[in-house]
Amino acid sequence: MYTPRHMKWWGWGDEDVSFNSSAHPGAWPYAKAQLGVEEDEVARPLMPIEAVRLPEAIRHEGFLSDLRREMRADQICDSRRERLIHAYGKGFRDLFRMRQGMAEGAPDLVIYPENENDVLMTLRAAARHDVVVIPFGGGSNIAGCLERSERSRMAVSLDMRRMRHVLEVDADSCTARIEAGAFGPDLEEQLNGYGLTLGHFPDSFLHSTLGGWIATRSAGMQSDKYGKIEDMVIALRMVTPAGVLATRTVPKSSNGIDVNHLCIGSEGTLGVITEATMQVHPRANSHRTHGYLFPEFEAGIEAMHECVRKECVPSMLRLSDSDKTALSLAFKPPSSQLSQAASKVMKGYLRVKGFDFARTCLMLTTFEGSKSGAIRQHGEVSAIYRRFGGVDLGPSSGKSFESTKYDFPHIRDFLLDRSITSDVSETSTVWSNLVPLYRATTTALRAAIVESGVKPWVGCHISHTYQCGASLYLTFAFKQQDGNEMPQYLHAKRAVQQSFIDCGATLSHHHAVGTEHLPWLTDDISPLGITAIAAIKAGLDPDNVMNPGRLRPSAAPFEEWLRVVSGAATAQRP
Amino acid sequence: MYTPRHMKWWGWGDEDVSFNSSAHPGAWPYAKAQLGVEEDEVARPLMPIEAVRLPEAIRHEGFLSDLRREMRADQICDSRRERLIHAYGKGFRDLFRMRQGMAEGAPDLVIYPENENDVLMTLRAAARHDVVVIPFGGGSNIAGCLERSERSRMAVSLDMRRMRHVLEVDADSCTARIEAGAFGPDLEEQLNGYGLTLGHFPDSFLHSTLGGWIATRSAGMQSDKYGKIEDMVIALRMVTPAGVLATRTVPKSSNGIDVNHLCIGSEGTLGVITEATMQVHPRANSHRTHGYLFPEFEAGIEAMHECVRKECVPSMLRLSDSDKTALSLAFKPPSSQLSQAASKVMKGYLRVKGFDFARTCLMLTTFEGSKSGAIRQHGEVSAIYRRFGGVDLGPSSGKSFESTKYDFPHIRDFLLDRSITSDVSETSTVWSNLVPLYRATTTALRAAIVESGVKPWVGCHISHTYQCGASLYLTFAFKQQDGNEMPQYLHAKRAVQQSFIDCGATLSHHHAVGTEHLPWLTDDISPLGITAIAAIKAGLDPDNVMNPGRLRPSAAPFEEWLRVVSGAATAQRP
C-alpha cells in the first residue's frame, strides 16, 4: 500500500529536503544584518532521536486487544520514531521543544485507519476504555492542534494518510468525493486525471491533507478565486464516538442549522472527518504570475481594494510590505549578468518614477483562466495597479515565486539551527481597519521583541481578499537569548495576538485555534460562543475522547498557555 | 414610533391589496380549464374575525408583572387581532385553518421589543416562569415555523418589527450593521440613502425581515449575484436565554467552529437574532430584465449551466417549465393592439424556428451593473442562450415581471376563495441530478393529486444557480374536495417532499424546516445531525423556552405531521 511519507520528526518537510543557503547567498547576510547577529554561520548539532526524552507509553491492554481484533499489525504502531513524528505539529513551540528533546506531547500509540469502519471502531473502543484520540493529517499544523493535553489517559494519534482516494467524480456538476487523508499533491494528481483541480494551495500544500484543511478552516494561495476551504465543502462525513454525521450533496439548503459547519473548524474535538464532497473546477489553461512594485504598502492595499471594488480580482494577490519585500529580494538566487543589467535599468526607471526603495512593496499577482481571459485580466488589473503607482516587473519574479512557493517553512529550521526564533501570526479584518491594524500590531510586536533585549525583524503580507476586507500575515524573527528562548517567543507571540484582538480582528484567518490561540477565543466568539461549542462537544463526544481541552479555554487560559511542557493540565470533562 | 404594518390575519399582504383578476382576465379561465373547475367564479365569504375559535389565553401573572416592570404597555399586547395575526405563517396549512376559524396556533401574548435588553429580559423572564417564546419577523414563513407546538405552557410571540434600524454603515468595507426586525423595503430604503443595497429580494421581500431571512436561510431572486443570506452575514448578535452570543466583524476566520452558522438557520430554537452585520454593495447603475424563450425545459437548463461554466452568470436567472410558462402567459395583462401584432410576428418567427408551443419555456434574466457592464453581459449571455435555441423577447416581459414580482402569493388567497388548494415546495440538487429529480418529482406529485380524484396542475421554475447545481421550485394546485381539503393537501405535499429526499435532494432550498418539512430532516442531515442540533439547544436554551419542538423530529414524525390541529403534541424537553 502506498503511504505518503512523514515529515522529519524534528523539522519541516521531507528528510532529504532542507533550505539550501548556497542557492540563496544573500539570505544569511540579510538575516545577520537585520537581527544583529555577529557570529559566523554555525549550525547547532541536531539531537539524535535516541536522546529525546520520550515518556513511557501508557498502554491500555483492553483497548489494544479491541484494536487488534479489527486491524492488522501494521496499522497499529508504537515505535519511538512513530510516537515522535506524531508528538507535535510544526509551530515554533513544537520545533523548539523537539530540538530540546522534550517530547511530552507524544501519543502512546499511532493508528493508521484504512476505511471509515476502522475509524468508527477505534473511536468506540476509545470511548469504552477511556482513551484519548487525536486526529492527524499531515502534521503541518502550527497552532498546537496535535499534541496531547493530558497525561492521565492513554492517547492515540489517528493518522489518516492511508485514506487518500478520490472516490467519485461528478464532472458535470464539478464535485468530487475525496477521502480526508489525501495530501495536496496526491489529491491534485488524482483530480488532474479528470481535468479538474480543487484549487486549494496553502503554503503547507505538500504536507497537509483535505481533512486537516477542513478541520482547521484552511485557506489556499488562490482563495481569491476558489474560496477558502469552508466555501468548497458541499457535503461530508464525520465519524464521532456517537456515530457518523453525514450530509447530502446539494449546493445549498434551508434545512435548519447547517451541520456541515459544525464539522468544519472542529479541530478534531468532535470526531474525525473521513471524507468530503468538494467543489472542484476545470483546470485553467493558462496560469501565470507577475510581480509588481508599489511605492508603498498603503498604495498596494488601495490597489487590491480597487480590484475588489471593480470585481476584477485575480486568482492570487500577494502584497508584501517593505520589510517582507526586502526579505524576498535577499532570497533571490544569484542573477545572470544579463538579468543584473536588466535589474539596473529597472532601478533607474523606478528612481525616475520617484520610488523610495526603503518603502517599495512587491505584489505578486496570478492570472488564471483561458489564455485570452488571463491576458484580458492582466490588462485590466495592470491598469488598476498603474493608478496606484504599480509597476509591472513581468513574469520573472512570478516564476521565481512559483518555483519556491512551498519552500518558505524550511527557513525556520535553518534559522533555528542558528539560534534564531522565527514564527508567524495571521488574522483578517475589514478594509477600513486594515492599515490601523497593521500599524498597531507591527508596532506592538516590534516593541515586545525589543523588550526582550534583541533586534526585531517583522514583515507582513496580505494574501486573501474579500469584498469586505482581507487577511494580514505577520512573520517575525529575532536572536535567541540562551536559556530564555521560550519566554522570549511567548512574549512576542502574546503581543501580536493581543493586538489582533484589541484591534477588532480575529485570532487567526486560516491557522486554527489549537493551543497557541486558545486564550483569545473567548474574546473572539464571546463566552456564549464557547458555551455553544462545549454543548456540541457534550452531545457528540460525551466521554471527551476527541482531542480534549481544545476549543475550550480554561478558567486561567494564559497560565496554561505559558506552561511549556504539555500534558501538565488536569483532564477536563466537557 | 413608526411600525411596519401587519399582513392580513387571514391571508397574504396588506389589508387593502389583493389579486385583481380583472387586470389579468386570462388567469381564471386558465385555472378553470387546467383544474377542471366547471362552476362560475364564486368567492367564499370570509369568516368575521370574531367568529374564529381562539383558545382562551394562558396567563402567567408572574411573567406578566416581570414584563410590565421593564416595558411600556404598548409593547405588550393580548388583543384578539394581535393573537390571530401571530398565530401562523402563510403556508396553505396556515391559511386554510385560519379560514376555518381554527386558531389553536395563536400565542397567548405578543411582545414588541425595542432594543436588545427588552429581548434579553423577556427571554430570562420566560425561562424563570416556564413560558415559551416564538420569534416573529414579518410572519411570511410558509414552513410552519411560527405556530406554538404545545398548549401546556404560556406562549409568547416576540414581534421584532420595532427593531428596524440600520445602525452603522462602513461604506469603505461595504458592511452594514442592521437590526433584525427591519423589513425588506425599509432596510433597502435606509441603505439606498448611502448608495448601497443588500441585494436580497426574496418573493416575500415586502413582508419579511432580516432576522427572519437569517433564521431560515432565505434566498433572494438575485442570489446568483449576491449570494444566499448565509453568504452575506459577516457578524451577528443572538440573544439566548443563556445570554448574548456575539461575533466579530471580520471577513473570514479560523477560530474553530464558526458560531455564526449555529445562529443562521436556527429557526428561533436557540434565541433571537437581534442584529447582523451584513455584506452590502454599491447600487447598480443599470438593471434590466429580458425574457427569453427556449424550445424546451432541458435546453433552458443546459443554457443556465453553460452560463455557470463560462462564469457568465447574470444577477437573476429564472427558467420556467412549459406549465409555469403557460401560467405566466395566462397572467399577462390585456395587450394593446400593437403588442398583439408584435406577438403575432414573434409567434410566426418561433414557428419557423421549430418551437412547439406546448413545450416552450420562458427564462427571465436580469443584467445588472454599470451600464456598459450590463450591455456586455446581455451580449454574452444571449450568445450562450442562442446556442441552446434561446430567443430574446427583449425587455417587455422583463418589465411585466419586475412590476408584479411580489404579487404572486396573493393568487393563493384568490384561489382559496374559490375552493382551490395551491402551494409550493422547493429544493436543490447537483446539475447531473436536476432533470431526473424534476421528472421523478413532478410525476410523483401529479400522481398523488390524481389519487385524490382531481386534476393536477404542477409547474416548476429554477431560480438559483450554483457552480455545482441549482434549485428546483414546484408550484401545484388542484380543486378541493369538500371536507377532505387537508388530507388532499397532505397527500400531495408528502409526495413531493418524499420525492426530493428519495432523489438525493434536500428538504428545502430556502423555505426552512418548520413543521412542514420536519419529518424529512433526519434523512437530510442524518440522525447524528439531529443529535448535534439538540445538543446546541440543550446548551443555549436548557429550559426549552425558544420555539420548542422545532428542528427536532419526534419518534413518530409523520403522525405528528398529519395532525392538523397544532398544540396537540406533548411538550418535549431537550
Image (cartoon, coloured by chain):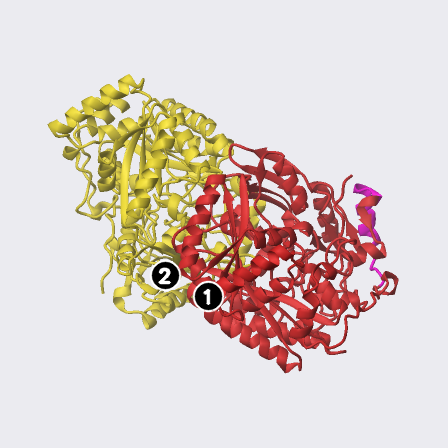
Chain colours: A yellow, B red
Residue A436 visible somewhere in the drawing: yes
List the residue tagged with mark 1.
B352
Callout 1: SS? helix
Q: Along the horizontal axis of the image, is A305 left or right of B411?
A: left
Is label 2 on the same chain as label 1?
A: no
- Looking at the rendered structure, the kind of residue marked 2 is Ala
Residue A476 sits in which quadrant? top left
The reply to whether the magenta stretch includes residue A21 is no
How far apart marks 2 and 1 lie (CA) works out to 43 Å
Counting from the top left corner in percent of width and height, residue A479 is at 28, 27
- Looking at the rendered structure, the kind of residue marked 1 is Val
Q: In the image, what residue occupies the spot 67% across and 72% down?
A: B560
Vertical side of B281 occupied by A35: above or below: above
- Look at the image and give the residue range highlighted in magenta: B56-73
- Nearest the camera: B568 or B172? B172
To which chain does the residue with label 1 belong? Answer: B
Counting from the top left corner in percent of width and height, residue A168 is at 34, 66
Callout 2: SS? strand
List the residue tagged with mark 2.
A176
Q: In the image, what residue occupies the spot 37% across and 49% down?
A: A147
Q: Which of pointers 2 and 1 indicates the residue nearer the eye?
A: 1
